[in-house]
Amino acid sequence: MSTTPAWVEIDAGAIAHNLDLVRREFGTATRLCGVVKADAYGHGITAVLPILTAAGVDVIGITSNAEAAEARRLGFSGRIIRLRAALREEVQEGGLLDIEEWVGGGDHARVVSAAARSLGRPVRVHLSLNSTGLSRDGMDWDDPQSQLHLRRIAVSPELTVVGICSHFPCEDADDVRTGALTFRNQACAAERLLGAPRGFLEKHCATSYAALTVPGSRMDMVRIGAALYGDTSAAAPGLRPAMRLVSRIAAINRYPAGSTIGYDRAGRLDRAGRLAVVPLGYADGYPRVLGGRASVLVRGTFAPVVDRLAMNSLIVDVTHVPSADAGDEVVLYGRQGSAQIHAADIEQASGTIAAAAYTAWGRLNARVVVNVPVYEPTPTP
C-alpha cells in the first residue's frame, strides 16, 4: 500500500507476458521496435526497458531526447528511433545519443541536414511517406516536388537513409490493408530513387493494431506500444492490462435526500446516501469530464463518481456498498478482485481514447512496480 493519496501500480509481469505473446504472434522474421515514448505510455521507461532488453529487443521508439537519455543511462546500447519530426536543436542534441531521426518531408530533411552539419557527421534517418493518408509529417507521393526531394536526399552527405516509414490514421482493417499496399509500392519506388539496392532500406508502418490485425502490414519491422501495455483494439486474446490507477477513501459521510453534490451542484441525491471522498482529482490526471459519468471499484463493487471533480478530490456514492470504510482501496482503472475498469470504460465515459488519460497518470502520480520478472543471468561461456 502506498503512503501517497493516489498512485499507479505497474504490473511488470503483465508487460513481459504481453511482449512474449506478440513476439510469438510475429515470429522471428519481423523485427520488433518497443515503443517507450511518453515515458512508456506512463508505465515508466525504468520499469519497461529492462523487460525489453532481457527479451532481446534491440530497437526502441521514443519522441523526446529525455527518453533517449534515460534509455542510455539504463544501459540500452541498441538502436533508438524518434517517432516524430524533430526540431533542429533536438536533432543536434539527439545526435549525442545516437538517435535515428524521423524525416517528415523534403523541407524537414534540410532541417535535419543543418543539424548534422553542426554535429560534424551524418545522421541516420527514416523517411516518412504519406502513403496512408495521415497527412501529418510524411512526404506525399503526388506532390510534384517529392521525387526531387528524394534525389536531393540521396546525394546529401549529411543524411544516411536507413529506413522508410509511415503511420496509419485509422484502426480499421480495410483501411490498413489499403494503406499498407500503397506504402509498400511507394516505399519500393522511393528506394529506387534513393539508389539503394532493393530491400536494403528498412520499411515499417505497422503499430500494434495494424500488426496484430493485418499481417501484410508488418514488413521489416513493427512498432509495438499499446499492445505491450495491454491496451489495443486489435483482437489479441491474452493481453493483460499492465496499469492500475489506485487511491483510497479518505472520509465517508451520510447526507439526506435532496443534497446537492460538488461544484455547480452537479449531482443530487434522490435518497439518503453515503458519499466517499477520494483524494484524487483532475490535477492528478483523472479527466474532469468523467465526473458524473465514470465508476470506480470499491470492495469489488462498481460505484459511480457523482460530482464534477475538484482539483485534488472526487466524490463516489457508496450507499450500495455498506461495508465501505475510510482507508479502503479505490481502483479507478484496472482490476480489483474479479471486477475491472477497462480502457473501453474510460473511453465510453470520456469520449476520447484511454491513452489520453493513462499516459499522464504515471507522470503525475507515484509509481509502484509489482510482479517484477526474475531473469536468470546468462551463463559465462
Image (tube, helix red, strand yellow):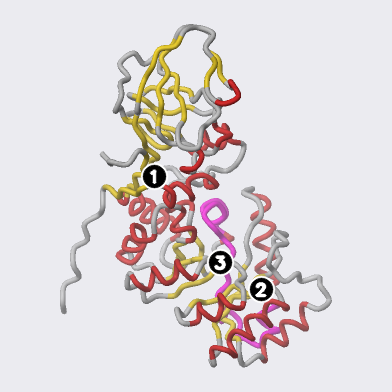
Left or right of 169: which side holds 348? left
Q: What is the C-alpha distance between the residues marked 1 and 2? A: 37 Å
Q: Position of residue 32 (x, y in %)?
A: 45, 65
Q: Position of residue 299 (x, y in %)?
A: 32, 24
Q: Secondary structure at mark 1?
A: strand
Question: Disc 2 designates what residue?
Answer: 187
Q: What is the C-alpha distance between the residues marked 3 and 2? A: 18 Å
Front in this rendered view, residue 255 or 166: 255
| Quadrant of the snapshot with the N terminus | top left
Query: Residue 243 bears which disc, if any?
Result: 1
Left or right of 253: which side holds 163? right
Identify the magenta region.
Answer: 188-215
To which quarter of the image does residue 178 belong? bottom right
Question: Disc 3 designates what residue?
Answer: 83
148 in relation to 286, above or below: below
Residue type highlighted by circle 3: Leu
Q: What is the C-alpha distance between the residues marked 1 and 3? A: 23 Å
Q: Residue at x 55, y 47 (%)?
A: 356
